[in-house]
Image (tube, grey):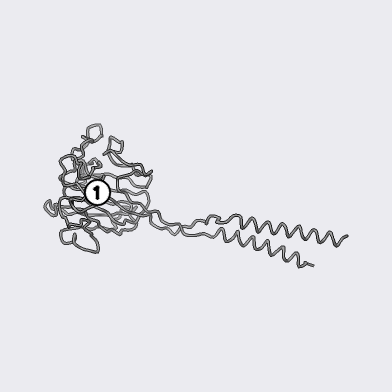
Amino acid sequence: MISNTSIGLFALVGAASTVMTTVMTALPVQAASYYLDFDTDPLSNPITSSTVGDPYGISDQWSDWGVTLGATNKAGSRAEPLLLFNSNPDSYTGGDRDLRSGDPWGTAVQNNVLIIQEDGFRRNGTVKNAHDPDDEANGGIISFDFQAPVTLGSIQLLDVDDFGARGQYVTFTAWDADGNQVATTQFDHVALTAPDRVTNLSSQGITGDNSLYDFALGYSGVARLEVLYPGSGAIAGLQWSDDSDDSTEPTSVPEPRNTVSLLGLVALGAVEVTRRRSSREE
């Protein structure tokens, strides 16, 4: 026969078990989001050199974020070096006045921007004249390779010009992990004014030299992005997020003391039962 006291004790134990079950409820993992603006490294340290300390140029400095960078000529037949260019209005190199940003052009100062270095590589693989960044006048292709599929948000380009003059336009092309092309978008003069896809970030409406545009991409399942620049120019920023895989993880215990306190009540209940039994036996 089970006494009322025993029933109460079992109820307390059951309640404690219920609390533990609730604590272990799984919730979806939120996808990580990144914005690469070339001003800080993955540890948020400010970047003050064109190579981020690597004489071979920009490539794997943000590998901790799951991305590596590279570049080729427009034909894709020759590797080209990448450097960071200081776009502050009072400081520029290589004679590239068209890569400056700031109040004179109605834009926010972009600080470091990514360029293809015009001087190329030395024979030993290091970047020529890395101390004097100078963007490639003939343009090229800058690539972003992701370790896992991502969703691309937006990209900002500085000095967007040369439309069609060299037979090509600014073009974004994305591939999945199997090498299948999943998206491509080409921007000519007309597409550049599409308000749903492109935003001119200059309060003065500057176009051509020193222009700054934000392009909405919205591509998902991307393992590689290529940005074709028909002429000179730079990338000021890129935003992406990890693709959601509906994975789950257990929640952390928000109030451990609640469970402990409840188990303490169980223990007190057990002591009380023992006392009552002892008094009856006496």
Q: Secondary structure at mark 1?
A: loop
Q: Name the residue at the left extreme.
A: 165
- Quarter occupied by residue 95: top left
- Quarter occupied by residue 193: bottom left
Residue 261 horizontal/vertical position (percent): 65, 57
- When the figure is inspected, residue 201 is found, relative to residue 89, above or below; the finding is below
- When the figure is inspected, residue 17 is found, relative to residue 162, above or below; the finding is below
| Residue 143 vs residue 217, the one in the foreground | 217
Residue 188 horizontal/vertical position (percent): 16, 58
| Residue 93 vs residue 65, the one in the foreground | 93
Looking at the image, which residue is at 62% across and 57% down? Answer: 259
What amino acid does circle 1 point to?
Answer: Val
Q: Is residue 33 left or right of residue 261?
A: left
- When the figure is inspected, residue 234 is found, relative to residue 203, above or below; the finding is above
Q: Is residue 14 left or right of residue 129?
A: right
- Quarter occupied by residue 278: bottom right
- When the figure is inspected, residue 46 is found, relative to residue 250, above or below; the finding is above
For disc 1, the marked residue is 109
